[in-house]
Image: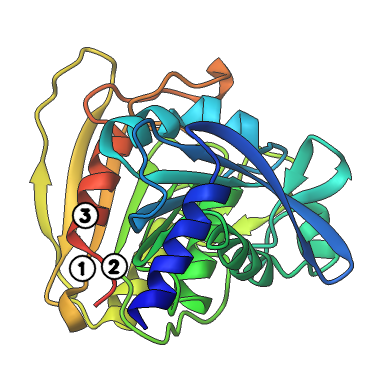
Amino acid sequence: MLAALLLLGAFLASDAPGPGDHTRTVRVGDLDRRYLVHIPPGHDPAVPTPVVLAFHGGGGNAAGMAAMSGLSEKADAAGFIVVYPEGTGRLPRVLTFNAGDCCGQAAARKIDDVAFTRALLDDLATVVAVDARRVYATGMSNGAMMAHRLGAELSERIAAIAPVAGPIGIGSCTPGRPVPVMHFHGDSDAFAPFAGGRGRGVSGTSFRSVGATIAAWVEADGCAGEPETTPLDDREDDGTRVRVERHGGGREGAEVVLVVIEGGGHTWPGREPPLAALGASTRDVSANDLMWEFFERHPMP
């Protein structure tokens, strides 16, 4: 067994991509699917490393998600690998994921993006040493909804999730194990409304509310129904404030955390939005910092 592990380590070290960005393609059914991998500097290809999957929003793509979120910079500082999967669509750079009831051609054609994620992780493990207990998922908007779906339907591979500005989009949340969740949402989000319903976007989706999303995970994880609420310091004069609502006491140490951006729009906390029409983005907290701290607390049991 030891000899086999040493041989595997030597293979990975010789074939592993170096620091920086790399595009890979994996066949899923009759489709060739792409994903972008960012390897941090100083990465040792023989050492099992955490992976964060970051799903772009509807109408976006992998490169856009990397630029919008800044997760590659966080990966460089913290030492994890970040992967930006690409959705599908009629136009090569305007893509969506099938997160259940959203979005676009991916949902209409019933693209199996859960199978894509599974195949992606299998493919990634052929070129880097993945720490299978520390694979996490985040995403923006439609990508956040995809992260929720993966938590519910791929819990044997996904240790924890941290969606941003996108509610759950499936009718049943029954993961095979308790999945810790940190959800970020602006209460002035006009595109995926905090209270649910149709937003300003073109998807036509009637979104579930943030409250319903959190309740689904609280039930699935066996967490306390009443949260502990903590207002955070208002560090910046940007028209927003932040409060954290934590539901603890879940099975296997799971917790469900809602980070509410009061006055926040359809944006990534801590980052400037690509369009002013998306609304305000808080500078009081960094989603990247908070989610990584959360992920570090929640490896796979």
Question: Which element carries disc 2, helix, strand or loop?
Answer: loop
What residue appears at the point 62 percent right and 29 percent down from the top-left corner? 64
For mark 2, does the 10 Å Cα neighbourhood hold few (<14), some (14 to 19), or many (20 or more) residues?
many
Q: Residue at x 15, y 75 (%)?
A: 253
Q: Is residue 132 left or right of residue 276?
A: left
What's the residue type where badge 2 is placed? Answer: Pro
C-alpha distance separating marks 1 and 3: 13 Å
Of tags 2 and 3, the one toward the viewer is 3
- Residue 223 or 211: which is nearer the viewer? 223
Q: Quadrant of the N terminus?
A: bottom left
Q: Residue at x 20, y 83 (%)?
A: 251
Q: Quadrant of the C terminus?
A: bottom left
Checking the image for residue 296, the label placed there is: 3
Tell me which residue sits at (34%, 33%) in the image.
42
Q: Amino acid at mark 1?
A: Glu
Q: What type is the residue that disc 3 sits on?
A: Glu
The first of marks 2 and 1 along the sequence is: 2
Q: Which residue is mark 1?
A: 255
Mark 1 Cα-neighbour bin, 10 Å: few <14, some 14–19, many ≥20: many
Marks 2 and 1 close (CB-CB < 8 Å): yes
Mark 3 residue element: helix
Sequence-wise, the earlier of marks 1 and 3 is: 1
Where is residue 134 drawn, in percent x and y? 33, 62
| Marks 1 & 3, CB-CB < 8 Å contact | no
Q: Quadrant of residue 258?
A: bottom left
Of residues 190 and 147, the one nearer the viewer is: 147
| Secondary structure category for the residue under label 1 | loop
In the picture of the structure, the residue carrying the numbered disc 2 is 180
- Looking at the image, the residue that sits furthest to the front is 3
Using residue 59 as the reference point, say whether residue 81 is left or right of it.
left
- Tell me the quarter of the picture where residue 180 sits: bottom left
